[in-house]
């Protein structure tokens, strides 16, 4: 593990992705087997950040402008700055590892440019970690494409279709796939005679379980920012943990959430039963239904019911704007389940009940 008190400068010339894959994979294996506290030490030491090129770090900074601020290698950088940068660096590296596996399977070459009519298949990764696959051109000049969105807002979706390229595919440029649908800029481009077999994998999964949106505004209080990041690390650890240790990690995450609720909720926050609903930073809405036992229904930003949580409870936590929340509930056949909320953004109290709105 890297010494958290020292960091390495980025190399003057970026090392090609295939050469870095072994280092990335070795680091990820150590990370996955580490305890949550040790994972925090990884991030404080900028362990993942140091494996990225300057171009990749710049892409991350543009992707999360409100969250990734400042120079994490500076002697004046805070713990929150370093951990936030390194956590996002890990997300990008996990996607790069999955991309690299596909490139190696297909024996493709890294390139900077592909002409619209060039008789090659193309596999590219965007700055957000999404994958774009383009088949070889057909006689009419069109190409079949598959776009796999990364673990971002609305992520996990897959789009398939046909596209007739009007411009060359260039490293650093976006690609228009339809009139109103284009990728973000391309971070890596590979070309070869055939695409790798379709494995159906969504970039970033199943290894990533962290937050899926940039924070709406910077968090000025650094202890809170570190606490929120620790919550994210605990959630990631719990989702990757063996069954026998997962319950303990769920309780630890609830403890961290409770501490943050107490720090941010100067008015005490709300009990779950005092709310009609609350909304998260990503736009998901949780409706609280009370008919004997308490149920919670999670709806997406479009209003569609996604998850029904029966016999829900939060184990002594309160619902506080700006803080995370852990919801324990019963799944199919009464199996114990857990839902993680990374940031409460809006609360809707029941009429005539509850504390004053915090925040």
Image (cartoon, grey):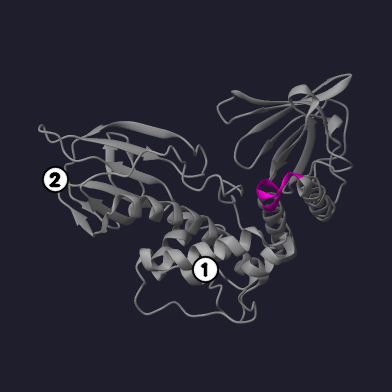
- Residue 35, by quadrant, is bottom right
Mark 1 or mark 2, which has the lower sequence index? 1
Q: Tell me the SS state at disc 2.
A: loop
With 127 as the anchor, is 323 left or right in this view?
right
Is 88 colored magenta in this rendering?
A: no
With 284 as the anchor, is 49 left or right in this view?
left
Q: x%, y% of residue 95?
A: 46, 53
Name the one closer to the observer, 315 or 214.
315
Residue 327 against residue 229 in the figure, above or below: above
The stretch of residues the image draws in magenta is 237-243
Residue 316 against residue 53 in the figure, above or below: above
Is 238 colored magenta in this rendering?
A: yes
Q: Residue at x 48, y 80 (%)?
A: 9
Q: Quadrant of the N terminus?
A: bottom right
Q: Is residue 312 visible?
A: yes
Residue with the mark numbered 2 = 119
Q: x%, y% of residue 57?
A: 45, 65
Q: Is residue 84 visible?
A: no
Instruction: Count neighbours of disc 1 (C-alpha within 10 A) and say few if under 14, some if 14 to 19, many if 20 or more.
Output: many
Q: Tell me the SS state at disc 1.
A: helix
Q: Residue at x 17, y 34 (%)?
A: 142
Front: mark 1 or 2 = 2
Q: x%, y% of residue 60?
A: 46, 59
Which secondary structure is most common in the magenta stretch? helix
Name the one closer to the observer, 53 or 264.
53
Q: x%, y% of residue 99?
A: 40, 52
Calculate the distance from the C-alpha at mark 1 to the C-alpha at mark 2: 36 Å
With 15 as the anchor, is 95 left or right in this view?
right
Residue with the mark numbered 1 = 49
């Amino acid at each position: 593990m890297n010494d958290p008190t020292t960091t390495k400068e980025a190399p003057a010339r970026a090392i090609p992705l295939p050469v870095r894959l072994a280092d990335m994979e070795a680091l990820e294996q150590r990370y996955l087997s580490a305890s949550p506290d040790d994972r925090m030490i990884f991030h404080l030491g900028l362990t993942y950040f140091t494996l990225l090129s300057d171009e990749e770090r710049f892409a991350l900074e543009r992707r999360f402008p409100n969250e990734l601020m400042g120079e994490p290698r500076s002697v004046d950088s805070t713990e929150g700055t370093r951990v936030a940068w390194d956590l996002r660096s890990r997300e990008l590296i996990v996607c790069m590892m999955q991309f690299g596996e596909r490139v190696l399977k297909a024996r493709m070459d890294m390139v900077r440019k592909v002409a619209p009519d060039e008789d090659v298949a193309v596999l590219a990764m965007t700055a957000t970690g999404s994958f774009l696959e383009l088949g070889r051109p057909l006689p009419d000049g069109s190409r079949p494409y598959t776009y796999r969105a990364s673990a971002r807002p609305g992520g996990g979706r897959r789009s398939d279709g046909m596209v007739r390229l009007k411009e060359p595919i260039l490293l650093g440029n976006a690609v228009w796939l339809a009139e109103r649908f284009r990728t973000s800029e391309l971070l890596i481009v590979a070309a070869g005679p055939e695409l790798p077999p379709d494995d159906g994998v969504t970039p970033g999964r199943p290894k990533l379980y962290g937050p899926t949106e940039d924070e709406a505004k910077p968090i000025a209080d650094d202890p809170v920012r570190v606490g929120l990041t620790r919550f994210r690390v605990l959630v990631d650890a719990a989702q990757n943990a063996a069954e026998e240790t997962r319950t303990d990690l769920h309780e630890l995450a609830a403890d961290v959430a409770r501490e943050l609720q107490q720090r941010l909720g100067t008015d005490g926050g709300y009990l779950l039963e005092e709310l009609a609903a609350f909304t998260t930073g990503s736009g998901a809405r949780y409706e609280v239904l009370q008919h004997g036992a308490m149920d919670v229904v999670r709806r997406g930003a479009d209003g569609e019911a996604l998850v029904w949580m029966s016999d829900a409870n939060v184990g002594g936590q309160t619902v506080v704007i700006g803080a995370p929340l852990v919801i324990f509930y019963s799944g199919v056949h009464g199996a114990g389940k857990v839902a993680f909320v990374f940031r409460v953004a809006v609360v809707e109290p029941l009429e005539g009940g509850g504390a004053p709105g915090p925040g």
